[in-house]
Image (tube, rainbow, N blue to C red):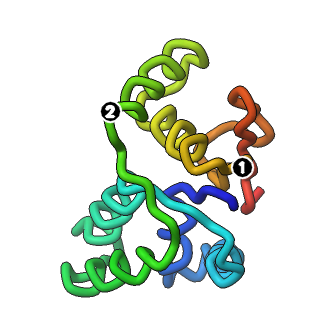
Amino acid sequence: MRFVDTNVLLYAISTDPAEQRKAELAGQILDEGDVALSVQVLQEFYVQATRSSRPDALTHDQALGLVESFLRFPTKAVDTPILLAACASRDTFGISYWDAAIIEAARAMACREVLSEDLSHHQDYHGIRVVNPFG
């Protein structure tokens, strides 16, 4: 399984012509079905998708419907062990807590890859490798 970061979900719903290629790639990733998420990713998706400054902002109902549909994928809650591991990873790797929580949720779900545009492409975080599917 591959863990997907929030940007994959956001590109999957994008109607921006400049993001058409990324939207197609994100759709293909989700269609393949071998992906995992965390509650953090779903929270970030909801907040960003409904942001009023977003040109193609979703309504609450639209975003909630998508969040519910994304629950078809294995989803990890951010629990105390992930919180503590993320704090340690933040210190070890010098990344934000939020990025570390993504890495540690992926680790907890036995994913070897995190698909993300936000983390460094090909960076290895003690066995979790970041792949930018859009780069």
| Residue at point 72%, 49% (across, down) | 113
The residue mark sitting in front, 1 or 2, is: 2
Residue type marked 2: Thr
Q: Name the residue carrying label 1.
A: 113
Image height check: is 1 above or below 103?
Answer: below
Residue type marked 1: Glu
Residue 38, located in which quarter of the rendered image?
bottom left
- Residue 52 in the image: state x and y as whole percent: 22, 68
Q: How busy is the neighbourhood of tag 1: few (under 14 within 10 Å), some, or many (20 plus)?
A: many
Q: Name the residue carrying label 2.
A: 80
Image height check: is 80 above or below 51?
Answer: above
In this rendered view, identify the residue nearer to me: 54 or 11.
Answer: 11
Q: In the shown orientation, is residue 82 left or right of residue 29? A: left
Image height check: is 67 above or below 77?
Answer: below
| Residue at point 73%, 62% (across, down) | 134
| Residue at point 64%, 74% (across, down) | 26
Residue 44, located in which quarter of the rendered image?
bottom left
